[in-house]
C-alpha cells in the first residue's frame, strides 16, 4: 500500500515580503503556516508524519494552468527550507499570495535540485541511491494551479523509492539457520524523476547504473531462526520496526538482479556441527514499484545428508585342520 505524508500549508503563499508589487492591501495578506497530518500510512528510517521534520519547497507563479508547455521561472519562492522547530513548522522570510496568477508548488525531502530550465513543463531532478549506510527515504509532493484561498493547501508527500526487505524461514524443524550476509547485485541505482502534477506526483525515467558493479550489502548482526515441530513456520526479519533494510530505485524489470545469501545451518543441539556453511545465489523476481514495500521470504534449506548405516554381516570362513598326538 502506498504511504502518503500530508503537509498542510495553512492560509497563504508566497512571495518575499520585499517584493510587494502585485499584492492586495496588506491587511489581507496571510503568511504561510504549516501543519502535518497522516493520511495513510535497520537501516533506513521510513518517513511518517510523526518523524517528518524537514522539507524544501519551491513555488512558481504562472499566468496559465500548469502543463507541458508552460515555462517555469525562478524568483517567486525558491528552495525554501521548512523545518519543525519547537513543534511548529517554520521557515525564514515571509511569503504571501499574489493578487493574480496561479502558484505551482513542488516539494522534496531531502532537498533536491529542481531543473526547470532544460525544458518547459514540470520540474525534474536527478537522483542516485546512496550506499547502504547512508540510504534515505525520499519523498516529494506537488500541488498545482493554486489561487488565493483562506483554505489550507495540502502537500501530499509520496514515497519515491522502494523498500526491499527480507524474512527468513527454515525448511526442517530443530535446525538453527543463521544468515550473516545478504548482497543484492545488478540493480539500477540512478534515474531522473519528473513531477506530473498528479496525486502520484510523477515518475522515474532513464534508469541506469551509476557505476559498474554497484552492490547493496547487509553485514550487520547475524539473523537466526529455528523452526520447531510446534512452530514450523517460525520466521525472522532483518529490519527493525519503522526501518527499511534497503531503500532502492524502483524498477519494473529485475532481469539480472541477484541475491547472495551467506548462512549456516546446524542441528540446534549441535550448533557448531554445520550441515551448510556457504553462500547461495538466487534470482530476484517481480518488480519494485515506487512507494512499495517489497518483502522476500527466503526458505533456507539445511542441505543435511543424514548418516545412514547398512549393516552386512560377513559369512563364516571355514578352515579345515589336522591334529595329531591325540
Image (cartoon, rainbow, N blue to C red):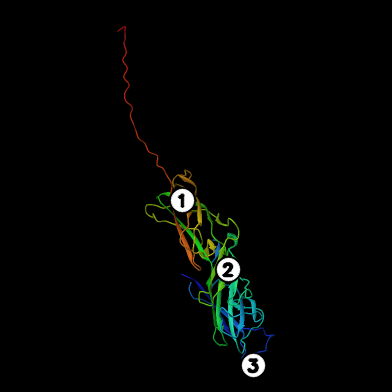
Determine whether the residue tagged by mark 3 lies in a helix, strand or loop: loop
User: How many marks overall?
Assistant: 3
Residues at marks 2 and 1, CA–CA distance in whole angstroms: 40 Å
Q: Earlier in the sequence, mark 1 or mark 3?
A: 3
- Numbered badge on residue 81: none
- Numbered badge on residue 25: 3
Q: Residues at badges 2 and 3 in contact (C-beta under 8 Å)?
A: no
Q: Nearer the viewer, mark 1 or mark 3?
A: 3
Quarter in which the C terminus is drawn: top left
Would you say 33 lies left or right of 278 here? right
Residues at marks 1 and 3, CA–CA distance in whole angstroms: 71 Å
Q: Nearer the viewer, mark 2 or mark 1?
A: 2
313 up-or-down from 249: above or below: above
Q: Residues at badges 2 and 1 in contact (C-beta under 8 Å)?
A: no
Determine whether the residue tagged by mark 2 lies in a helix, strand or loop: strand
Residue 152 point in image, percent of width and height: 55, 84
Q: Name the residue beneath numbered marker 1.
A: 177
Q: Residue at x 46, y 50 (%)?
A: 177
Q: Earlier in the sequence, mark 2 or mark 1?
A: 1
Q: Name the residue beneath numbered marker 2.
A: 192
Q: Residue at x 65, y 78 (%)?
A: 78
Residue count near mark 3 (Cα–Cα under 10 Å), binned few <14, some 14–19, many ≥20: few
Amino acid at each position: 500500500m502506498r504511504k502518503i505524508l500530508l503537509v498542510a500549508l495553512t492560509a497563504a503563499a508566497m512571495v518575499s515580503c520585499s517584493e510587494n508589487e502585485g499584492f492586495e492591501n496588506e491587511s489581507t495578506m496571510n503568511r504561510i503556516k504549516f501543519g502535518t497530518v497522516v493520511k495513510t500510512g535497520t537501516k533506513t528510517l521510513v518517513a511518517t508524519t510523526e518523524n517528518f521534520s524537514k522539507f524544501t519547497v519551491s513555488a512558481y507563479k504562472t499566468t496559465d494552468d500548469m502543463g507541458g508547455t508552460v515555462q517555469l521561472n525562478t524568483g517567486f519562492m525558491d528552495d525554501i527550507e521548512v523545518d519543525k522547530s519547537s513543534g511548529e513548522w517554520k521557515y525564514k522570510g515571509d511569503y504571501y499570495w499574489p493578487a493574480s496568477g496561479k502558484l505551482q508548488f513542488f516539494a522534496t525531502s531531502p532537498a533536491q535540485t529542481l531543473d526547470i530550465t532544460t525544458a518547459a513543463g514540470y520540474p525534474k531532478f536527478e537522483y542516485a541511491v546512496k550506499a547502504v549506510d547512508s540510504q534515505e527515504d525520499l519523498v516529494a509532493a506537488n500541488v498545482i494551479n493554486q489561487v488565493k484561498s483562506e483554505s489550507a493547501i495540502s502537500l501530499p508527500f509520496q514515497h519515491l523509492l522502494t523498500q526491499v526487505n527480507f524474512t527468513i524461514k527454515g525448511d526442517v524443524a530443530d535446525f538453527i539457520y543463521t544468515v550473516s550476509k545478504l548482497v543484492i547485485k545488478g540493480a539500477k541505482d540512478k534515474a531522473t524523476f519528473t513531477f506530473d502534477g498528479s496525486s502520484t506526483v510523477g515518475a522515474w525515467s532513464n534508469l541506469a547504473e551509476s557505476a559498474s558493479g554497484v552492490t547493496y550489502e547487509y553485514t550487520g548482526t547475524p539473523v537466526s531462526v529455528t523452526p520447531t515441530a510446534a512452530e514450523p513456520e517460525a520466521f525472522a526479519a532483518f529490519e527493525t520496526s519503522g526501518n527499511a533494510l534497503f531503500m532502492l530505485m524502483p524498477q519494473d524489470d529485475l532481469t539480472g538482479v541477484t541475491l547472495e545469501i551467506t548462512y549456516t545451518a546446524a542441528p540446534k543441539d549441535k550448533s557448531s556441527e554445520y550441515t551448510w556453511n556457504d553462500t547461495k545465489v538466487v534470482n530476484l523476481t517481480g518488480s519494485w514499484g515506487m512507494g512499495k514495500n517489497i518483502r522476500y521470504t527466503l526458505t533456507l534449506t539445511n542441505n543435511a545428508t543424514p548418516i545412514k548405516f547398512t549393516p552386512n554381516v560377513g559369512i563364516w570362513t571355514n578352515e579345515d585342520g589336522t591334529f595329531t598326538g591325540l
